[in-house]
Amino acid sequence: MKTVTGLMAAMLALGVSATTVKADAVPDAPKFDAQGKVTMVGVGDILEYKALPSYNEPDFVKALEKDGKLPALKDRLPKEPMVYKTGNMKDGIGVYGDVMRHVIGGRPDGWNYSAGQSQGWGGIDIGLSECLTRTGPLFQVKAEELQPLPNLAKSWDWSKDGMELTMHLIEGAKWSDGVPFSADDVMFYWEKNVLDTNVHPLNGANPGTFGEGTTLEKVDANTIKWSFKTAFPTQVLYAMAYGTFCPGPAHILAPQHPANSKNTYDEYKNAFPPTYSNMPTMGAWVEVDYKPDNIIVLRRNPYYWKVDEKGNQLPYLNEMQYRLSTWADRDVQTIAGSGDFSNLEQPENFVESLKKSADPAAPARLEFGQRTIGYALEFNYSANGWGDTDANSVAVHNLNRDLNFRKAVTSMLDRQRLGESLVKGPFTAIYPGGLFPGTSFYDKASTVYYPFNVDAAKADLAATGLKDTDGDGIVNFPKDVNGGKNVEITVLGNADYQSDKSLVDGVVAMGEKVGLRVIPKLLSGKDHDAARDAGKYDWEVLRQSSEMVTAVQQTDHLAPIGPNTTDFHKAGADGKVDLMDFEQKLVDIVNKFIGAKDSKDRVALMKEFQKISTENVYKAGLTVYPGALMINKRFANVAPGAPIFMYNWAEDNIIRERVFVPKDKQSKNELFPDTLPGKPGSAPGEGLVK
Ligand code: GLA
Ligand code: CA
């Protein structure tokens, strides 16, 4: 098959000419002031690890302990628990009790996070999993001290030459079922879930995530050692946070892994369905009840390894509820006070929410942050058999790989209008692609922007070799490509979010104006995720994740440094990603960035990334806007100015294990009062300790 690019050259030679799109400066975003005031601190102001003279826990847990239903508190805590400093807690030492009622649009696939199962998002997995390091709360850490917080790894030392990193794990900590946590859990995650490429952990961790050629070994029960191919790749500490290095319970998972059982990889992944309750965690809460399309309930983990300075074992909140509803309902319920927490991220709800929360009697407070929510149009770049392989899909994927075509697409997009279709006012701003405007690695001068221009878009389509040969208003493939048929492009979108649907509609309408038939493929939940994972789309409208905001978090999503790291371009059956030339450059930049020591180098590398990715329209950016955190006013110690999204989502950023409700404001909403999680694998709602 003659390639489209080849055809283009031929047509240009024939003198097909028109004015194609020209790059321009990105227009300045409308002014919008974030409301939350953040006091910047050092890591040591937030936490430390040390033994305290005495410890305390809720009265009902003391009673259970007295009845012999669980070991003494001091035997459940590690030698040196993590201690949160009172000075960094807005309302100080808390009291026990109450529940945080979340509402989510997702549904759980099951509890095997290590093998890629989603728990339904909305911060469920964030509350259950703990990771070697932690990044969510970094929004309040001073630039000079910026590095991930210690977490399961309580400290680390670099070797003199910077080629090795020894990490000291918390010592004597236990999983929520009382089984000791150790380096074996870490090694099981690494060897059998990350290195074993038949397993795909939920957020796509693979060996390259931690630097090419990196190895990990166990030194002793509480010590692990990383070896790198470059000196001092301090950046990898970010990859050890949520969601790429949060080990699961090896004592539960390993027996089901194909290496130790007759299970297939699929059976391993699905061995812990949503009805398997009390999956052991290192998190502050443990899942104890699940009712399909109704609710998931988490109860406090009696082995949790974090305390306040008075020795009170955390969390303060006894319960977390997750109502299984819709994402839009999360906003509605939080405003009404029947839910407690929402990331207000769908601009369609901004005006109404602002109005309602302006009432002093409103149950929830609302605080806008920076513009860190954004959408891009992603192209399926696979010409290697990943995704759909019918003639039309193959032909469209080849178009996607043609820069003239991508220029046509980016200049057909009226981003101003797309933003306004979500919400009018100063919220949305034009997003050309690349790192988000206004974030720390963003560089305007390195950003290439192709402005909205229908005529230029049409000229670029012609330059790609696409012409409406049968006069029905839709451009056709050249005669020798896909039978010269009309060009039809599927655009995948998440039907669970109104904003995603609105943006898909906008893209479809704007395609029509230039003669492209774009066909929406709106899917919900699991079906949507499955289509994404399998590459079953030509284009995708997608809310961007933290790599576009911080560059240091989920860095491996920026370009396909591994077979599976970049969701829109994965390896084919041969295990290789068919990289385009400029994409190979992006891969090299990202690999250097992951291995870089100096922040100066990192800044320079990201400028280069920005230039090459926007010049080549690697993704066509759509719009960016601020989100607002809505949280019921009864909660205390919510970290001030916590953004709904930066290094991680607000469910991590606000540090929920320190959040509490003053006694006089406590609700009676706990569904399983005075109980603790029970035996792993119990039926939902059963087997609780009481
Ligand atoms: C979903 C929601 C976000 C956030 C995350 C947390 O994606 O849309 O607001 O709650 O889950 O994982
Ligand atoms: Ca046609």
Image (tube, rainbow, N blue to C red):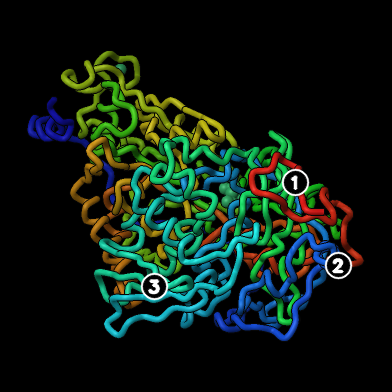
Q: Where, by quadrant of the figure, is residue 483 drawn?
A: top left
Relative placement, left or right, of 335 versus 621 is right
Relative placement, left or right, of 67 versus 382 is right
The numbered disc on residue 560 is none
Q: Nearer the viewer, residue 600 or 315?
A: 315
CA gap between label 3 and label 1 equals: 37 Å
Q: Is residue 495 above or below residue 279?
A: above
* Residue designated by label 3: 219
Q: How crowded is the residue under tag 2: few (<14 C-alpha within 10 Å), some, or many (20+)? A: few
* Residue designated by label 1: 687
Quick one: label 3 or label 1, which is nearer the N terminus?
3
Q: What is the three-letter code of the residue carrying label 2?
A: Asp
Foreground mark, 2 or 3, reads 3
Are dots 2 and 1 in contact, CB under 8 Å?
A: no
Quick one: label 2 or label 3, which is nearer the N terminus?
2
- Work out which quarter of the rendered image holds the N terminus and state it: top left
The numbered disc on residue 59 is 2
Ligand 1 within 8 Å of disc 3? The answer is: no
Q: Is residue 302 visible?
A: yes
Q: Is residue 460 visible?
A: no
